[in-house]
Image (tube, rainbow, N blue to C red):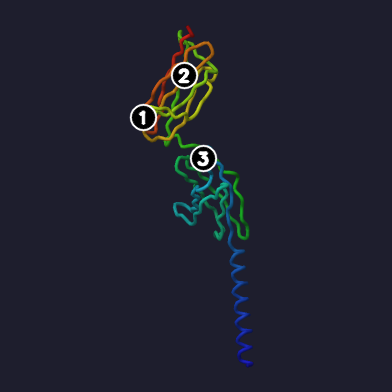
Amino acid sequence: MEMRIWKTIILVVGVGLCVATAAAQDKSKGGIKGKIKVETGSPSGVLVLVRQGDREVAHTTSDRNGSFSIQNLTPGVYGLTFRKTGLSVGTKENFEVKAGQSRSLDQIFLPVDEGSITFLRGSVFDQVGRSVPNARVELARILDDGSLKKLDSRVTNQTGQFVFRLTPEPAKYRVTAKADGMQAGSKDVDVDSAAVYRLAISLNPNK
Protein backbone atom coordinates (compact mmCIF):
# COMPACT_ATOMS: atom_id res chain seq x y z
CA MET A 1 0.00 0.00 0.00
CA GLU A 2 2.81 2.40 0.96
CA MET A 3 4.59 1.67 -2.30
CA ARG A 4 1.49 2.64 -4.29
CA ILE A 5 1.17 5.91 -2.37
CA TRP A 6 4.83 6.74 -3.03
CA LYS A 7 4.41 5.96 -6.73
CA THR A 8 1.39 8.27 -6.89
CA ILE A 9 3.33 11.08 -5.15
CA ILE A 10 6.30 10.65 -7.47
CA LEU A 11 3.96 10.72 -10.50
CA VAL A 12 2.24 13.92 -9.33
CA VAL A 13 5.56 15.62 -8.61
CA GLY A 14 6.88 14.54 -12.01
CA VAL A 15 3.84 15.97 -13.80
CA GLY A 16 4.20 19.19 -11.82
CA LEU A 17 7.85 19.50 -12.84
CA CYS A 18 6.93 18.96 -16.51
CA VAL A 19 4.24 21.67 -16.33
CA ALA A 20 6.66 24.05 -14.62
CA THR A 21 9.30 23.33 -17.24
CA ALA A 22 6.80 23.93 -20.06
CA ALA A 23 5.78 27.22 -18.47
CA ALA A 24 9.39 28.26 -18.22
CA GLN A 25 9.91 27.34 -21.85
CA ASP A 26 6.85 29.39 -22.90
CA LYS A 27 8.27 32.43 -21.12
CA SER A 28 11.45 32.06 -23.13
CA LYS A 29 9.52 32.45 -26.38
CA GLY A 30 7.60 35.34 -27.90
CA GLY A 31 4.87 35.98 -30.43
CA ILE A 32 3.42 38.28 -33.07
CA LYS A 33 -0.19 39.32 -33.48
CA GLY A 34 -1.95 41.83 -35.69
CA LYS A 35 -4.88 42.72 -37.91
CA ILE A 36 -5.10 42.94 -41.70
CA LYS A 37 -7.35 45.31 -43.65
CA VAL A 38 -7.96 44.82 -47.38
CA GLU A 39 -9.08 47.25 -50.07
CA THR A 40 -11.74 44.89 -51.37
CA GLY A 41 -13.24 41.54 -50.37
CA SER A 42 -12.84 39.73 -47.06
CA PRO A 43 -9.74 40.03 -44.83
CA SER A 44 -9.97 36.32 -44.00
CA GLY A 45 -7.61 33.75 -45.48
CA VAL A 46 -4.58 36.01 -45.86
CA LEU A 47 -1.45 33.86 -45.61
CA VAL A 48 0.98 35.25 -43.03
CA LEU A 49 4.57 34.00 -43.36
CA VAL A 50 7.21 34.63 -40.69
CA ARG A 51 10.79 34.38 -41.92
CA GLN A 52 14.38 34.91 -40.94
CA GLY A 53 16.32 35.78 -44.05
CA ASP A 54 14.99 33.50 -46.79
CA ARG A 55 13.96 30.76 -44.33
CA GLU A 56 10.30 30.38 -43.36
CA VAL A 57 9.95 29.66 -39.63
CA ALA A 58 6.16 29.84 -39.12
CA HIS A 59 2.93 30.64 -40.91
CA THR A 60 -0.80 31.08 -40.29
CA THR A 61 -3.87 32.60 -41.95
CA SER A 62 -6.04 35.51 -40.85
CA ASP A 63 -9.55 34.91 -39.49
CA ARG A 64 -12.77 36.46 -40.78
CA ASN A 65 -11.96 39.72 -38.98
CA GLY A 66 -8.45 39.87 -40.44
CA SER A 67 -6.79 39.02 -37.13
CA PHE A 68 -3.85 36.62 -36.78
CA SER A 69 -1.49 35.38 -34.07
CA ILE A 70 1.75 33.40 -34.21
CA GLN A 71 3.34 32.25 -30.94
CA ASN A 72 6.34 30.21 -29.70
CA LEU A 73 8.88 32.19 -31.69
CA THR A 74 12.49 32.34 -30.56
CA PRO A 75 13.44 35.91 -29.61
CA GLY A 76 15.05 37.65 -32.56
CA VAL A 77 14.41 39.85 -35.58
CA TYR A 78 11.94 38.62 -38.19
CA GLY A 79 10.36 39.60 -41.50
CA LEU A 80 6.71 38.98 -42.38
CA THR A 81 5.01 38.48 -45.74
CA PHE A 82 1.25 38.75 -46.35
CA ARG A 83 -0.32 37.11 -49.41
CA LYS A 84 -3.81 36.62 -50.85
CA THR A 85 -4.89 36.14 -54.45
CA GLY A 86 -6.08 39.39 -56.01
CA LEU A 87 -4.26 41.57 -53.47
CA SER A 88 -0.81 43.11 -53.52
CA VAL A 89 1.82 41.33 -51.42
CA GLY A 90 2.55 43.08 -48.13
CA THR A 91 5.76 42.90 -46.11
CA LYS A 92 7.05 43.99 -42.73
CA GLU A 93 10.79 43.86 -42.07
CA ASN A 94 13.02 44.04 -39.00
CA PHE A 95 10.29 43.24 -36.48
CA GLU A 96 11.79 42.25 -33.13
CA VAL A 97 10.28 39.47 -31.04
CA LYS A 98 11.11 39.50 -27.31
CA ALA A 99 10.93 36.70 -24.76
CA GLY A 100 7.64 36.48 -22.85
CA GLN A 101 5.89 39.02 -25.07
CA SER A 102 3.32 38.83 -27.86
CA ARG A 103 4.01 42.02 -29.80
CA SER A 104 1.32 43.73 -31.88
CA LEU A 105 1.92 44.94 -35.41
CA ASP A 106 0.45 48.15 -36.74
CA GLN A 107 -2.57 47.43 -38.93
CA ILE A 108 -1.54 45.92 -42.25
CA PHE A 109 -3.33 47.24 -45.37
CA LEU A 110 -3.33 45.21 -48.60
CA PRO A 111 -4.50 47.08 -51.73
CA VAL A 112 -5.81 45.42 -54.87
CA ASP A 113 -3.17 43.87 -57.12
CA GLU A 114 -3.83 45.81 -60.31
CA GLY A 115 -2.10 43.11 -62.33
CA SER A 116 -4.79 40.59 -61.41
CA ILE A 117 -7.94 42.57 -62.27
CA THR A 118 -9.52 44.23 -65.30
CA PHE A 119 -10.08 47.97 -65.53
CA LEU A 120 -12.68 49.61 -67.74
CA ARG A 121 -11.59 53.25 -68.01
CA GLY A 122 -13.54 55.70 -70.08
CA SER A 123 -14.66 59.26 -70.75
CA VAL A 124 -17.98 60.82 -71.67
CA PHE A 125 -18.13 63.68 -74.20
CA ASP A 126 -20.85 65.85 -75.72
CA GLN A 127 -21.41 66.29 -79.47
CA VAL A 128 -18.60 68.85 -79.79
CA GLY A 129 -16.05 66.87 -77.77
CA ARG A 130 -16.37 68.56 -74.40
CA SER A 131 -16.20 66.45 -71.24
CA VAL A 132 -19.50 65.73 -69.52
CA PRO A 133 -19.20 65.77 -65.70
CA ASN A 134 -21.81 64.14 -63.43
CA ALA A 135 -23.06 61.82 -66.17
CA ARG A 136 -24.44 58.51 -64.89
CA VAL A 137 -22.55 55.51 -66.27
CA GLU A 138 -24.05 52.02 -65.94
CA LEU A 139 -22.24 48.71 -66.39
CA ALA A 140 -24.06 45.54 -67.48
CA ARG A 141 -22.89 42.10 -68.51
CA ILE A 142 -24.18 40.81 -71.83
CA LEU A 143 -25.36 37.23 -71.27
CA ASP A 144 -25.27 34.42 -73.83
CA ASP A 145 -28.94 34.97 -74.73
CA GLY A 146 -28.33 38.67 -75.39
CA SER A 147 -30.01 39.88 -72.21
CA LEU A 148 -28.32 42.30 -69.82
CA LYS A 149 -27.39 41.78 -66.19
CA LYS A 150 -26.82 45.10 -64.41
CA LEU A 151 -23.67 45.10 -62.29
CA ASP A 152 -22.66 48.58 -61.20
CA SER A 153 -22.92 52.32 -61.82
CA ARG A 154 -20.77 55.43 -61.52
CA VAL A 155 -20.98 59.21 -61.89
CA THR A 156 -18.30 60.84 -64.04
CA ASN A 157 -15.87 63.22 -62.37
CA GLN A 158 -15.25 66.83 -63.35
CA THR A 159 -13.29 65.76 -66.42
CA GLY A 160 -15.98 63.30 -67.55
CA GLN A 161 -13.98 60.20 -66.61
CA PHE A 162 -15.05 56.93 -64.95
CA VAL A 163 -13.54 53.55 -64.07
CA PHE A 164 -14.87 50.07 -63.23
CA ARG A 165 -12.88 47.21 -61.68
CA LEU A 166 -13.72 43.69 -62.82
CA THR A 167 -12.52 40.13 -62.42
CA PRO A 168 -10.46 39.08 -65.48
CA GLU A 169 -12.50 36.13 -66.75
CA PRO A 170 -13.68 36.42 -70.40
CA ALA A 171 -16.99 38.26 -70.73
CA LYS A 172 -18.79 40.88 -72.77
CA TYR A 173 -19.99 44.11 -71.15
CA ARG A 174 -22.12 47.09 -72.13
CA VAL A 175 -21.31 50.52 -70.72
CA THR A 176 -24.13 53.09 -70.99
CA ALA A 177 -23.86 56.81 -70.20
CA LYS A 178 -26.76 59.17 -69.51
CA ALA A 179 -26.93 62.91 -68.81
CA ASP A 180 -29.70 65.48 -68.51
CA GLY A 181 -30.77 66.93 -71.84
CA MET A 182 -28.85 64.31 -73.85
CA GLN A 183 -29.57 60.99 -75.50
CA ALA A 184 -28.05 57.94 -73.85
CA GLY A 185 -24.94 56.46 -75.47
CA SER A 186 -23.34 53.04 -75.03
CA LYS A 187 -20.33 50.94 -75.98
CA ASP A 188 -19.78 47.16 -75.84
CA VAL A 189 -16.46 45.81 -74.59
CA ASP A 190 -15.08 42.26 -74.92
CA VAL A 191 -12.87 41.38 -71.93
CA ASP A 192 -10.53 38.40 -72.22
CA SER A 193 -7.78 39.02 -69.63
CA ALA A 194 -6.51 41.22 -66.81
CA ALA A 195 -5.77 44.50 -68.60
CA VAL A 196 -6.88 48.11 -68.96
CA TYR A 197 -9.66 48.63 -71.51
CA ARG A 198 -10.33 52.21 -72.59
CA LEU A 199 -13.45 53.61 -74.23
CA ALA A 200 -15.07 56.93 -75.08
CA ILE A 201 -18.82 57.54 -75.19
CA SER A 202 -20.31 60.52 -77.04
CA LEU A 203 -23.75 61.89 -76.12
CA ASN A 204 -25.93 63.84 -78.53
CA PRO A 205 -28.53 66.40 -77.42
CA ASN A 206 -32.17 65.35 -77.23
CA LYS A 207 -34.14 66.09 -80.38
Name the one closer to the observer, 147 or 186. Answer: 147
Q: Position of residue 27 (x, y in %)?
A: 62, 64
* Alpha carbon distance from label 2 to label 3: 27 Å
Name the one closer to the observer, 86 or 27. Answer: 86
Q: Of tags 2 and 1, which is closer to the observer? A: 1
Which residue is pictured at 47% across the width and 45% down the height? 83
Task: Pick the quarter of the image with the N terminus.
Answer: bottom right
Q: Is residue 78 above or below residue 90?
A: below
Q: Secondary structure at mark 1?
A: loop
Give the amino acid at mark 3. Gly
Give the amino acid at mark 2. Ser
Horizontally, residue 148 falls left or right of residue 34, namely left
Q: Is residue 118 above or below residue 95?
A: above
Horizontally, residue 34 falls left or right of residue 169, namely right
Q: Secondary structure at mark 2?
A: strand
Packing grade of label 1 (10 A; few <14, some 14-19, many >=20) is few
Whichever of labels 1 and 3 marks the residue nearer the N terminus, that label is 3
The residue labelled by disc 3 is 41
Packing grade of label 3 (10 A; few <14, some 14-19, many >=20) is few
Q: Is residue 197 above or below residue 128?
A: below
Packing grade of label 2 (10 A; few <14, some 14-19, many >=20) is many
Q: Residue 123, labelled with which disc?
A: 2
Contact, mark 2 vs mark 1 (Cβ under 8 Å): no
Whichever of labels 2 and 3 marks the residue nearer the N terminus, that label is 3
Q: Position of residue 74 (x, y in %)?
A: 55, 60
* Alpha carbon distance from label 2 to label 1: 28 Å
